[in-house]
């Protein structure tokens, strides 16, 4: 095998991985106007993520996921380019929702509620966007 075959194989693997991630984003995206709500509460969400990521009482795996999410949100390169309709600008919110679902499955909803600095309506919007138990 020469180096050209290796490069072609690597390029095919990268494209296949990107397509798999794109399909995963389509499957976990919030439906309807919920996505707009998720984008509206993004500043409060970022504060929540940082607060959770620095909380040493949470399991290490949860904190690692949250730090990786914060790094992804800070990167100028997105999984889905911004010119793609609907998902272009929403991929950050979709990835954040997917991570939040994983965090809630692991530690419950209370740590999120306790550290939320936004309004109660904002927390309810976060719960709707992430498909979490309704905020009470």
Image: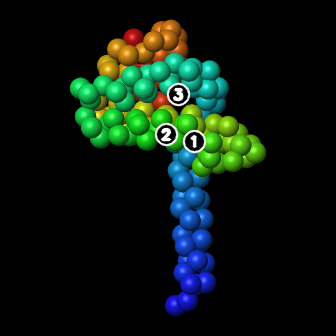
* Mark nearer the viewer, 3 or 2: 2
Q: Which residue is mark 1?
A: 75
Proximity of marks 2 and 1: CB atoms separated by less than 8 Å: yes
Residue drawn at the location 35% of the way across and 14% of the way down: 114
Q: Residue at x 45, y 12 (%)?
A: 117
Point out the image quarter for the C terminus: top left
> Callout 2: helix, strand or loop?
helix
* Occupied quadrant, residue 39: top right
Circle 2 packing at 10 Å, graded few (<14), some (14-19), many (20+), is few
Q: Quickly name the residue at label 3.
A: 129
Disc 1 residue crowd, few under 14, some 14–19, many 20+, Cα 10 Å: few
Name the residue: 54% across, 69% down: 13
Location of mark 2 (residue): 71
Q: CA distance from mark 3 to mark 2?
A: 21 Å
Which residue is at 55% across, 37% downward?
Answer: 74
Residue 58 in the image, given as x and y percentages of width and height: 26, 29
């Amino acid at each position: 095998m020469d180096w050209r075959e290796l490069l072609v194989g690597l390029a095919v693997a990268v494209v296949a991985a990107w397509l798999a991630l794109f399909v995963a984003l389509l499957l976990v995206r919030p439906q309807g106007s919920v996505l707009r709500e998720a984008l509206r509460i993004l500043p409060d969400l970022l504060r929540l993520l940082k607060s959770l990521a620095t909380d040493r009482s949470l399991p290490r795996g949860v904190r690692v996921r949250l730090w990786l999410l914060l790094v992804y949100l800070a990167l100028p390169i997105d999984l889905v380019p911004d010119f793609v309709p609907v998902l272009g600008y929403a991929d950050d919110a979709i990835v954040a929702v997917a991570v939040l679902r994983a965090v809630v499955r692991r530690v419950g909803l209370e740590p999120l509620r306790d550290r939320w600095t936004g309004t109660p309506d904002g927390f309810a919007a976060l719960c709707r966007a992430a498909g979490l138990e309704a905020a009470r």
